[in-house]
Image (cartoon, rainbow, N blue to C red):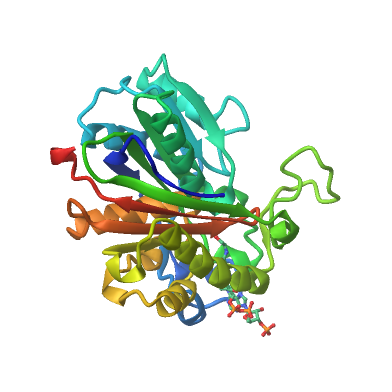
Amino acid sequence: MIGSANGTRVGITGLGVCVPERVVTNDDLARHVDTSDEWIVERTGIHERRMIAEDQALTDIALPAAQAALQDARIGEGDVDLIICATVTPDMMFPTASALIADSLGARDAAAYDLLAGCTGFMYAVAQAYGMLAAGLSRRALVIGGDVLSSILDWTDRSTLVLFGDGAGAVVMEPVGHGGFLGFELGADGGGGVHLQLPGSGSRKFESPESMLRMNGREVYKFATRVMVSSAEAVLAECGRTIDEVDVYVPHQANKRIIDHAVGKLGVPPERTVVNVDRFGNTSSGSIPLALADARADGRLRDGALVLMTGMGAGLTWGSALLEWTDRRSA
Ligand code: UT7
């Protein structure tokens, strides 16, 4: 699916993030599996990640991220009519994380649902919210992307254990006077889905009773390096913009090598690229909002800045969005 915005301008007017307090280093993981800090840093660029405590679940980090986004947008807790939570690790299948968050916020008039698109979930969710806002169905939306992949990792599998972390981010989206989303490109390839799956997590029976993440890293790597480039190029072309015009490039934070490959192929200057995979690992749906928050903390999200975001992950899925940043003080 590809399309450029027409009609109502819809932008991001609030941004908040939350990561668990517990820092897990590469050396910590080397106590569980046969790995080393050297291997992990060289092959992935990851130095550490955050993981929730035993008694926590997704909404323990997604709710604070949502509250921070609402506060950033300077609106009341109940002042949204649409809540989408992109995640593959809700507290449970139902009630949904979004319904639980709506209840905690007191957002009684809000439609609330979870969205499942692997690590691309946040990109799919902002595209959906954009559509509902532009069509006038929603007045103001809260879009959350978050995962606690630590809860579905196999702690005996070194090829996946070292890659992932927990984290959540949220944005408030609403009509704005200038700037806003310019276009989206989203896609899925279920044929490649077998390379990154969570067997036993749904209605199909598997031999193993346990539901843990399984990945063919080499195949996902090939897929990732391809779509990170093709999706970004597609959305730029659709919107009539070029890579030279992009001020802030926000790629999914899965592996520094995948990011470097995309940066090289696209021709984005490295200084315009946001990288935080070293501190958080791959936080799935939390990845892009966490990177957006870092870009803002660095002062890079100036009013009018052209922001290119691309996610990819399980499904297999991918998605890009092009956005002209709207400083909330001038929204
Ligand atoms: O959101 C999307 C999610 N996933 C991704 O984006 C992941 C995409 N894939 C990757 O990032 C990379 O394929 C990995 C980081 C997963 C693996 O890197 P690689 O350079 O492709 O390594 P490899 O799979 O080719 O494995 C090389 C060797 C293997 O040993 P042998 O067979 O050569 O003896 C692995 O068993 O490295 C071994 N290995 C490890 N060694 C130490 C795999 N994991 C580890 C580890 N520590 N944690």
Q: Quadrant of ligand 1?
A: bottom right
Residue 255 place in picture, x, y as percent: 48, 70
Residue 217 place in picture, x, y as percent: 64, 70
Q: Is residue 150 visible?
A: no
Front residue (pair 290, 63): 290
| 236 lies left or right of 11 | right
Q: Outermost residue toward the top? A: 108
Which residue lies at the image location 71% right of the left edge and 48% below the top edge?
211
Q: Is residue 100 visible?
A: yes
Task: Tell me which corner region of the image, top left, top right, bottom left or bottom right, holds residue 61.
Answer: top left
The quadrant of the rendering that contains the C terminus is top left
Front residue (pair 288, 25): 288
Residue 1 place in picture, x, y as percent: 57, 49
Which residue lies at the image location 49% right of the left edge and 62% below the top edge?
234
Which residue lies at the image location 51% right of the left edge and 62% below the top edge?
231
Number of numbered discs overlaid on the protein picture: 0
